[in-house]
Amino acid sequence: MIENFDLSLVNWSRAQFALTAIYHWLFVPLTLGLSFILAFMETLYVRTGDELWKKITKFWMTLFGINFAIGVATGIILEFEFGTNWSNYSWFVGDIFGAPLAVEGILAFFLESTFVAVMFFGWNKVGKKFHLASTWLVAIGANLSALWILVANSWMENPVGMVFNPDTARNEMNSFRDVVLNPVAVDKFLHTVTSGFVLASVFVVGISSWFLIRKREEVLARKSILIAGIFGLVSGLAVALTGDSSARTLAQVQPVKFAAMEALYEGKTEAGLTVIGALNDSGERIGDKKVHDVKLKIQVPKLLSIMTTGKGSGYVPGLKDLVNGNPEKGILSVTEMMERGRYARQVLIDYKMARELGDTDSMASLAAKFEDRDFTENYFRYFGYSYFEHPWQVIPSVPVTFYAFRVMVGLGFFFILLFMLALWFHRKKTLEKNRWFLWIALFSIPLAYLASELGWIVTEMGRQPWIIQNLMPVHVAVSNISAGAVQTTFWLFAVLFTALLTAEISIMVKQIKNGPKH
Amino acid sequence: MMEVSGKTINRIFRFYYDGFRTMSWWGKRVWIIILIKLFIMFLILKIFFFPDFLKVNFSNDRERGDYVLEQLTGNK
């Protein structure tokens, strides 16, 4: 099965999607967060009538515009890839993705496109309040656009609100409410947008610090640090809170990813959360997967149990429980799930055969199974396991998931500290005296992007080998095209996106150096 | 009624026209980048490198569904 597949095609397709998604995500979070910072600043201008706030708003709006313009439509390339490289997947999920993405497209076009024009062209041409309303609508519209994309992405991690139609080989939405209020989607949306707010706040604090280092635009810099510091601190705390609720949801719907994030192989009660640790090959294997010991670790006792079950004595399953099963804890083995998945696939094969033979009675009874609750909950939900030969194939890369998660969380707490210090020095009027802080703030900008990308690496690498959790593994999703063609477009994208990023950075740096007067 | 609509359209047109005409250097530069990017994406990449696999290879949804069903039930 999986060994017979063209792994080169799968790997190049994954690499290409990862490349385009990572580049696309370099542009998005700044738009999400900076749009709100602009709205706060312009609100202060409208409320106080102070022209300085207008000047500050226009300066940051310029940087927002550069980022927005360069990044716009880069996400469409991901949709190209769905149709070309991931056709089985696109067909399988088409009806589920259609609605959220259509709403996203309409929102993006009407809200962002219309009101972005008012934001940039409307100074002194429309009323102050109308201009302010446009700025707020851009911020709300940009973040609502993200909502629909994240709803679609969350469905891949926790497929709900649909029924599989064996005749068309597609999942069809039967509850829009379940798709939108998917607990993964709610957590992911809140966690992702608030992390975008943190990134934008770090960006504003960092650039403002550069002005203070250069002894330029000091009033603008101090006022910007105040706004971004408050917004960043509140958002940073919200990221921590939403991360906590995400962990609880994750432990329910993607327990293998959760265990990989903690490198937890043996399930345990009173499980501690590893704050810092280094992985070491224990020499043991699960199939061909290495088992890692966590060395040099600093743990918070019982915290993992509390995070996942709400009590310190709660049991957190490890990778061995999840692969081999643990009947005492009600955990099915992957072998059992593979059996159930094969049964579900056999029903689909039987349906296909009946259709070819024109046996309408068998077709009707087999099709009815896909709407039967017992079959969908106990067999079809494990459909994707039928494509594996070995239980250990469901384990993702533990080191990538473990380290990416720790660096992301560590940076998240670092940013909270950064905002607290920024506000403290601002209050004490000692920002300029603490040049070490200004330099740290400036060099925190790339760290904010790193943390944001690592969040996606935890999400997407941690759920391997699934493209749709439990229903479709990645290797089943790819189109039957040549690996060479995918390799060619990989490099084309690498060149295109690098050129776009270089253009963005060079125009932005020039505009920052010019300052608000130009 | 028609006169009001005409005036509104004219005002919207003037709004965008003046906005583009008085655009700053960075605005002009990013518009050039946007146009080049969209040209590359839609007229080169989409047409020559990213055909929709199922649309190109099959003429209707029935055939597309049958193909994916074959993929799902076959020996992947």
Image (spheres, grey):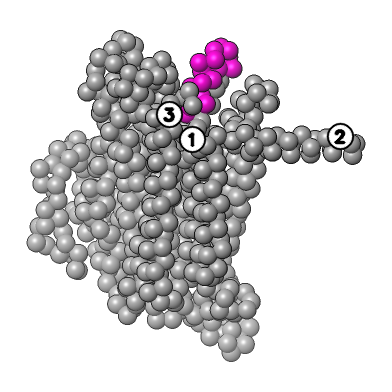
Is A439 left or right of A484, judged from the image as shown?
Answer: left
Q: With respect to residue B10, does A227 lie above or below? A: above
Marks 2 and 3 on same chain: no
Q: Residues within 10 Å of mark 2 (few under 14, many from 20)?
A: few
> What residue sits right under mark 1 in the picture?
A64
Mark 2 element type: helix
Asked if one can make out residue B34 in the rendered structure from this viewpoint, the answer is: yes
Q: Which mark is residue B4?
A: 2
Question: Where is residue B1 shown, x and y percent of the image?
Answer: 90, 36
Segment tinted magenta in the rendering: A45-60
The chain that hosts pointer 3 is: A
Question: Where is residue A326 shown, x and y percent of the image?
Answer: 26, 59
2 and 3 marks in contact (CB < 8 Å): no
Is A38 left or right of A226, judged from the image as shown?
Answer: right
Kindly identify the residue that appears in the image at 32 percent across and 18 percent down.
A215
Kindly identify the residue that appears in the image at 9 percent across and 61 percent down.
A283
Mark 1 element type: helix
Rounded to the nearest angstrom, the CA distance separating label 2 from label 3 is 43 Å
